[in-house]
Amino acid sequence: MAAGNPILQIDNITLVFGGVTALNGISFDVAEGEICAVIGPNGAGKSSMLNVINGVYVPQEGRVVFKGQDCTRMRPRQIAQLGMARTFQNIGLFQGMTVLENILTGRCMKIRSTWLEQGLNIGRARREEVENRRAVEEVIEFLHLQGIRKTPVGKLPYGLQKRVELARALVAEPTMLLQDEPMTGMNLEEKKDMSCFALEINREYGTTIVLIEHDMSVVMDISDHVVVLDYGAKIGDGTPDEVKNNQDVIDAYLGVTH
Amino acid sequence: MDTFLSLLLERAKKNPDVPAFRTKRMGIWNPTSWSQARDQVSILAQALSQNGVEAGTPVGIFGPNATDFYLDYLAVQSLGGIVVPIGTNTFGDELAQQVNGADVEVVLAFEQQHVDALLECGQTCVKRIFYINGRGMENYTQPELMALPDATGGIEASAAFLEQMEGQRNPEETATILFTSGTGRSERPVELSHGALIATARSIARRETITEKDELLAYLPLSVSSDFLFSFSLALTTGCTLNCPESDDTVLQNMQEIGPSVLFGPPYVYKYIYTHASNRIESARTFDTKIYKSALRAVMTVASHRAAGQKDSFTDWLLFMFARITTFSPFCNIYGLSRLRLALTGGDAIAPDVFNFFRAIGIDLRETYGQVEGCACVTMQSPEDWNSDSVGLPLDDTEVRIENGEIWFRGPGQMKGIYKNPEATADSIKDGWVRTHDAGHLDDQGRLHVHGQIARMGSLNGGGAFASDMLETRLRSFEYIKQAIVLGDGRDYPVAVVTVDGTITRTWADRRSLRYTGYADLSAHASVQEMVREYIQKVNEGLAEDPATSGMQFRRFAILNREFMASAGEVTPTRKLRCHEIEEKHRGLIDALYSDALEYTYTDPVDEESYTVPLGNV
């Protein structure tokens, strides 16, 4: 996917928890339609960065601009309505509900009918029910989840739960998808599947993806743009090749080459 | 005399609104009625005709089981073209071999995966590839590619076109080219005519009164001859509905939803259900397990009496009925078997314990015997056959004879020949009889008994007879053993390489609190070795009872670190083992089995990891 204009601008963000500075004056842009990876050692501030982007944390300084709107102080729900969806590092699914029901929850932003209409199954509620189910089925087909549609999520292995979480994010039809360590704890095959899905989502729907990842081979293979954080500061920003050859990054994260 | 096209037109006139096909997509079963089928076929046929498909053109059909592809069959056949079905997971050399072997010029493929496989496999004869789903292929520029919707756009359905085509067809024409499975010999393209396939399907339908009210499930890869016969041909000849599952991993669920009334499955399907059930019982509460086991005992007692030809005693019969109603009727419902009135198996020998189990719980399971050369079915058991040792009587107008221990047959269902290979055809058909390369005998009631492939029978050093197929079937009877290969021809004693069923063995190990990391570790566990050893000892005791088999007792065995896999070329699409490939690949392991070594360490080419396989003495 060719990268276009910046869809997300991070401008001089500083986030402080008490005496700890989690993020220190960070700025970078994410272009429309690209896959951007945020990497860095443990405690570098990657998850905090993601939480700032989708409004869970409010930074003390700086601005987050998404699609030209300043959303630094917006609530997560408002930001989601702008077209941003995310997945979590620790799976945040409803364990007792089926895969289908879990994915359906991702559509709740799209529901316009009132609780009364829904309760009586009349008017808009009826039409929306069909629309939402169709959207869910499309995602189920896209991510090959047909075999587990009716399985409670709690019974699924970890790799599949991650995929269900991705499905839930995707069903909201986001313009931007945030993924917090989508491949942690997966085996090689699951990682391969997950990388393919990320690429396909990007290509098929034109979704911009920002992901945090530890696995270097995955990051270098699939991303167009890599941002490196260390102790709350940005130490690298560029294409995978540029980052790979950046001496600061090598020292801080990749280790000194032998 | 009929062709598949005339059957379609007749059905579309007789029951235009009855569903002919059903495919599950996006969570919904989508029916296609006979008249819709006719209309779609007429559009497809016109489009193909405009793109150069004519009588005698081999057309590859490459996709999953779905309405679209069965309609493609009909469209190709209505023009007199030859259908070459290709299984959805075929790729690489195997794909190139099939495409080149049948001179396929045009391929109807499903989506990117299939198009990529075709472009990359190194085939040399395809001139045009149609695809249905263009997702991910926006940037493909190959001139041979064409989206099927583009080809059919603007064409109107025309029954007259099909009727005109019907006049030009004749039943002697080749309907399809199917490949022999290649477990022993190399794969060969077999030409089957409309007449042969329809006669075979009619013969089965007549015997079992299969009608338009029946429901079938099509789930075997398209390239498998049983799918062509028991799904496509049977549906067209009888007018019953053919249901196609949503994907490979939803077959069991979809079966439960549809509740097919007639089902064909290779032995692995029945073994899977059998093992799946055993596994669930293994992990159930003690009380439930007790109830299930006593119910099973009640039905098995009666089944064994009936197999031996004895009458049931009244109490046995009462317990039998009670067990069936209280336990096995719900059991069948869970697996989608409650509407099943005819279950067929074939293509490989079914393990006797699995066969007996299904007969006992009330499933009318019958063994069939057949080969691609005979439209996949030559003989079939009758309802009275309570034993899995025979494969029943020949179909209508079909004869079977034994010459020098080898089975030969002739009848309306026999092949036209091996495609473009007169020498191989002459070798396979002599004086109108077709050879099978299988050994067997006929009993006094005319029923056929199959002993196994001739190429796999031999003798041990020291002169004792040796039959790998029979020994493997006995090993596979055990629910913990998934696959087994037995060697011994020209050796001092028989040895076995087996793989364990991961699911049930894990449950078994968890109940015993064994510690293991994964499948490889579990299969090498001392307790698993011990369990398998005990079973093989039991098999040996059985072999010792019969003087004809007492020389074939196992002395050594190994449990492999992984299952035999199709992707490693070790298994056919119907999950039969390719013995030659396995022998070649695991030569080191086999040699170690014929030494005194207690373990064998090797690097598995599949994942390039090193494994140590313990070798057991029985």
Image (tube, rainbow, N blue to C red):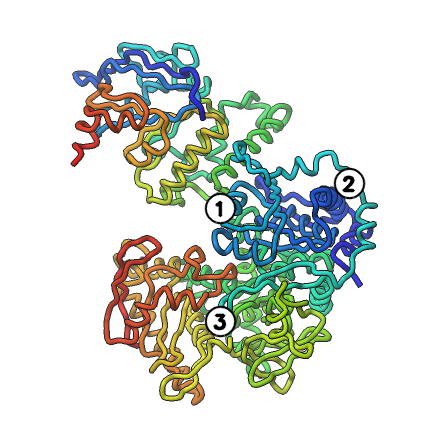
Discs 3/1, front: 1
For disc 2, the marked residue is B157
Q: Which quadrant is the C terminus of chain B positioned in?
A: bottom left
Secondary structure beneath dot 2 equals: loop
| Foreground residue among B1 and B227 | B1
Q: Secondary structure at mark 3?
A: loop
Tell me: residue B307, above or below residue A240: below
Left/right of residue A88 with respect to residue A114 in the rendered view: left
- B542 vs B162, left or right, is left
Residue B220 is situated, as x and y percent measured from the top left of the image, at 56, 57
Say what amino acid the circle numbered 1 marks. Answer: Glu
User: Which quadrant does the N terminus of chain B fall into?
Assistant: bottom right
Q: Earlier in the sequence, mark 2 or mark 1?
A: 1
Q: Amino acid at mark 3?
A: Ala
- Alpha carbon separation for disc pair 3 and 2: 49 Å
Q: Residue B412's quadrant in the figure? A: bottom right
User: On the same chain: label 3 and label 2?
Assistant: yes
Left or right of B9? Residue B109 is left
In whole angstroms, how far apart are the C-alphas of marks 2 and 1? 35 Å
Residue B348, image x and y in percent?
Answer: 52, 69
**Residue type, mark 2 in image:** Ala
Tell which subunit mark 1 falls on.
B
**Residue that badge 3 annotates:** B351
Name the residue rendered at 45%, 57% in the picture.
Answer: B566
Q: Residue at x 67, y 55 (%)?
A: B82
Q: Secondary structure at mark 1?
A: helix
What chain is tagged by disc 2?
A: B
Is residue B77 shown above or below B298? above
Disc 2: CA contacts within 10 A as few (<14), some (14-19) or many (>=20) = some
Residue holding disc 1: B120
